[in-house]
Amino acid sequence: MTVHIGADAGQIAETVLMPGDPLRAEWAANTFLDDPVCVNRVRGMLAFTGTWKGNRVTIHGSGMGMPSLSIYANELIREYGAKTLIRIGSCGAMQEKVAIRDVIVAMTASSLSTPSRGIFRELNFAPCADYGLLNAAVEAAKGTGANCHVGGIYSADVFYDERPDLNEIMTRHGILGVEMEAAELYNLAARHGVRALAVLTVSDHLLTGEALPSEDRQSSFGDMVQIALEAAFS
């Protein structure tokens, strides 16, 4: 048990999927896991542990933004022994070739700053995914039939962005999509020698203004969860 996670020793699996929304964690656990058990409710951040094809899995909410994810990822790794952490969440597309409901597997995650900036100081560290997980996710995506893109994403500090110039630069440099957590997850994974990946579903488009209706979002995220699970245990 930690300050932010109420699970007892042994209740968290070595493989953890991390959606931002705790209710999405509940949905994913009930949809994909056998015999899921709620192991955390502290501050409303739900976590469930069950099995998928006989493999133990925990699905733990991370909250919104890198500071929130950093708290949970640190405690999961340092106190509960998590070895594989996969972010599953939504993102906004930044390229014309990327469409609503497409899946992005994040090779790298650029950012203006992260909670790890104080450690890196003047160094511009380049956070990236675990290659084995990334490669496995790409193969898993073929089996789902999902339209999958692989490349760099941008992890933002703000949701209500007022930097159209920065968005233009990101698009010009091939950034596929924007979200708010992956860069710090990749930093922490590198620091602690564990595996990390972000598998994202496109819920809106920064170039076209198109957005997935809220009632359709949950049902559109199944491919992403399936890909994450297949990648974790390939």
Image (cartoon, grey):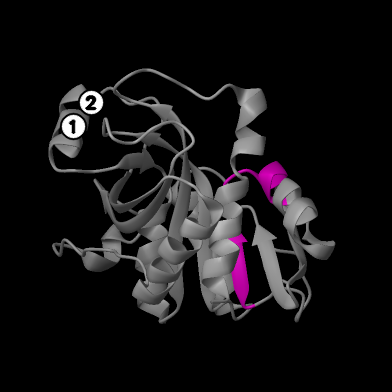
Residue 17 percent location from the top left of the image? 59, 61
Is residue 20 a member of the stretch shown in magenta? yes
Residue density around tag 2, few if under 14, some if 14–19, many if 20 or more, within 10 Å: few
Say what secondary structure mark 2 lies in.
loop
Q: Residue at x 38, y 69 (%)?
A: 135
Left or right: 233, with 148 as reference point:
right
Residue 218 percent location from the top left of the image? 65, 36
Residue 19 in view of the camera: no
Say what secondary structure mark 1 lies in.
helix
Image quarter hosting the N terminus:
bottom right
Q: Which mark is residue 97?
A: none
| Front residue of 5 and 133 | 133
Q: Residue at x 18, y 43 (%)?
A: 174
Q: Say which quarter of the image contains residue 180.
A: top left
Q: Identify residue type, mark 1.
A: Leu
Q: Residue at x 44, y 68 (%)?
A: 196
Residue 54 in view of the camera: yes
Tag 2 and tag 1, C-beta contact below 8 Å: yes
**Which residue does the numbered mark 2 point to in the structure image?**
163
Q: Which mark is residue 166?
A: 1
Extent of the magenta region: 14-25
